Amino acid sequence: MTTTTPAPAAAPSERVSARVHVQRFGTFLSNMIMPNIAAIIAWGLLTAFFIPVGWTPNEKIATVVEPGIYFVLPVLIAYTGGRMVYGVRGGVVGGFAVLGVIMATY
């Protein structure tokens, strides 16, 4: 698990540059994705092997590909982001929030 240490608070007279804000935001996003790399790779391999034009087509296993990209991966990433913000409770809230977004747009 990747953790970040909070940056020391800037003195009132100092201004934090936009570059620092962008770097912090990028670090936050990468910390949401990196723990889920194994799931993303597994989904990619499943897709490469079993879709109809894949290496070893299999109709039954290929039915897992679409729900994986629409439901599983977004919920995993949202859970990880929520957990980074507010622990397990934040992870659960993040997962449910993204499920609401998915259901509203699916």
Image (cartoon, rainbow, N blue to C red):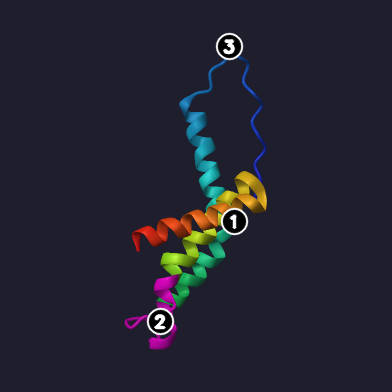
The amino acid on which the numbered mark 2 sits, given as a three-letter code, is: Ala
Task: Specify the farthest residue to the top.
Answer: 13
Q: Position of residue 24 (x, y in %)?
A: 54, 36
Work out whether mark 3 precedes mark 1 in sequence or the reverse, and give the earlier one.
Answer: 3
Q: Residue 21's mark?
A: none
Residue 104, image quadrant: bottom left
Q: Secondary structure at mark 2?
A: helix
Q: Point out the tag, 2 or 1, that comes first from the N-terminus.
A: 2
Residue placed under numbered mark 2 in the picture: 62
Residue 53 part of the magenta segment:
yes
SS type, badge 3: loop
Expressed as whole percent of the image width and height from the top left, the position of residue 53 reads 32, 81
Asked if the residue under mark 1 is in contact with the one under mark 3, i.e. CB atoms within 8 Å, the reply is no
Q: Is residue 7 above or below residue 49?
A: above
The residue depicted at 41 percent of the width and 76 percent of the height is 48
Q: Which residue is mark 3?
A: 13
Please name whichever residue, 104 or 81, is drawn nearer the observer in this view of the structure. 104
Task: Answer whether residue 58 is visible to the viewer in this image.
Answer: no
Tell me what residue is drawn at x 53 percent, y 48 percent: 30
User: How many dots with numbers?
Assistant: 3
Q: Residue at x 50, y 41 (%)?
A: 26
Q: Position of residue 43 (x, y in %)?
A: 47, 71
As measured in the structure, the alpha-carbon distance from the residue carrying label 3 to the one carrying label 2 is: 58 Å
- Quick one: quadrant of the N terminus? bottom right
Q: Which residues are magenta?
A: 48-67
In the image, 102 versus 61, the foreground residue is 102
Q: Secondary structure at mark 1?
A: helix
Q: Is residue 24 magenta?
A: no
The C terminus: image quadrant: bottom left
The residue beneath circle 1 is: 92
Name the one closer to the observer, 49 or 106.
Answer: 106
